[in-house]
Image (cartoon, grey):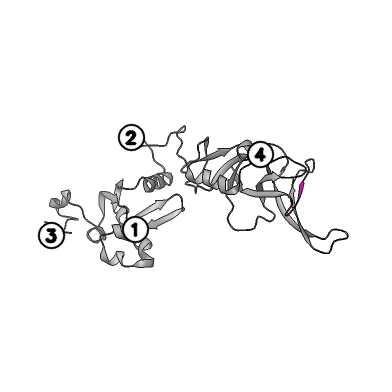
Amino acid sequence: MHFEVECAAHDPNGIDQIGCVYTAQGFEFDYVGVIFGNDIIYSFLEGNWVGHPENSKDPVVRGAKGKFVDLVKNTYRVLLSRGLKGCYVYFLDPDTEKFFRSRIDVAGEAYHKVREEEIEPYVNALPLVELRELEGTSLAEWRAQLEEGWKGEFRRVPGGPFLRNRFLFRAEDASMEPSIPKDALCEFRIPSDESPENKVVLAGLKTYSKKTSGAAMKRYQRLSVIQAGEVAETTKILLTSENKAYPSLELREGVDSIEILGVFERIIN
């Protein structure tokens, strides 16, 4: 980058020029302006920073391979911390701007504050799902609905931004009390490859001899049993209620069809 002045960081003639980390580090200013480029962007889908070396103009950083994201993050840390009184930031990537806004508190009417009624999906809100919307749905179908964009209601919740595998479900009965009270708003996530053993889950029941197709919020347990007169061991799945006034569901593997549609994370309220 060519500068017409000897040092743009402190020369008055440098006010109309754009510098970089090499011309700004070591200096402090009353105010700074930073252009946050697309060399790294925040991905809500992955829940992490994603590097794009092809968008970097710094040959040293661009060739850092596995250290690229950390080096670029440090570059922006230096640039964003040069202002003593304030910092103006322009973002090339909209999701990166949303991520920053979700992590700071702003004051004053002149700022673009997120109003109380304003909903930003997966930034400050999650899909609110009803039991009927899960009935007859496979895990693959349910994952696709969330990843492709939930068309239903969103509800504001603290703690964002969120991955697109998260959703809200309200406990419709007292079957999981005292752990999960009736009407509690709960955060669930799409299951990964981990075992759901002894976890509270949303189970989709496609075929069950004692219940028509539907879904249930229960604690998941697998038991190995040997029936009287049988030699081979079979697996029994129990979907248990913590409130003993509500029955548990007993399913036999290979006989009853079940899919785990969500794993409990926390109670929102």
CA separation in Å, label 3 and label 4: 66 Å
**Residue bearing the label numbered 3:** 6
Which of labels 1 and 3 is toward the front?
A: 1
Please name the residue shown 43% across and 44% down the image: 102
Q: Are marks 4 and 1 in contact (CB under 8 Å)?
A: no
* Residue 179 on the magenta span: no
Q: Which residue corresponds to mark 1?
A: 52
159 vs 64, left or right, is right
Quadrant location of the N terminus in the rendered image: bottom left
Which of pointers 4 and 2 indicates the residue nearer the eye?
4
In the displayed orientation, state which residue is furthest to the right.
Answer: 229
- Indicate which disc, 1 or 3, sits on the residue closer to the N terminus: 3
| CA–CA distance in space, label 2 to label 1 | 33 Å
Q: Amino acid at mark 1?
A: His
Give whichever of 99, 199 is nearer the camera. 199
Q: Which one is earlier in the sequence, the residue at label 4 or at label 1?
A: 1
Identify the residue at image location x=84%, y=58%. 227
Q: Is residue 15 above or below residue 212?
A: below
Q: Identify the mark nearer the N-term, 2 or 1.
A: 1
Picture coordinates of residue 269 (x, y %)? 60, 39
For marks 2 and 3 on the same chain, the one whose residue lies earlier in the sequence: 3
What's the magenta region?
A: 245-253
Indicate which disc, 3 or 4, sits on the residue closer to the N terminus: 3
| Residue density around tag 3, few if under 14, some if 14–19, many if 20 or more, within 10 Å | few
Separation of disc 2 and disc 3 at Cα? 37 Å
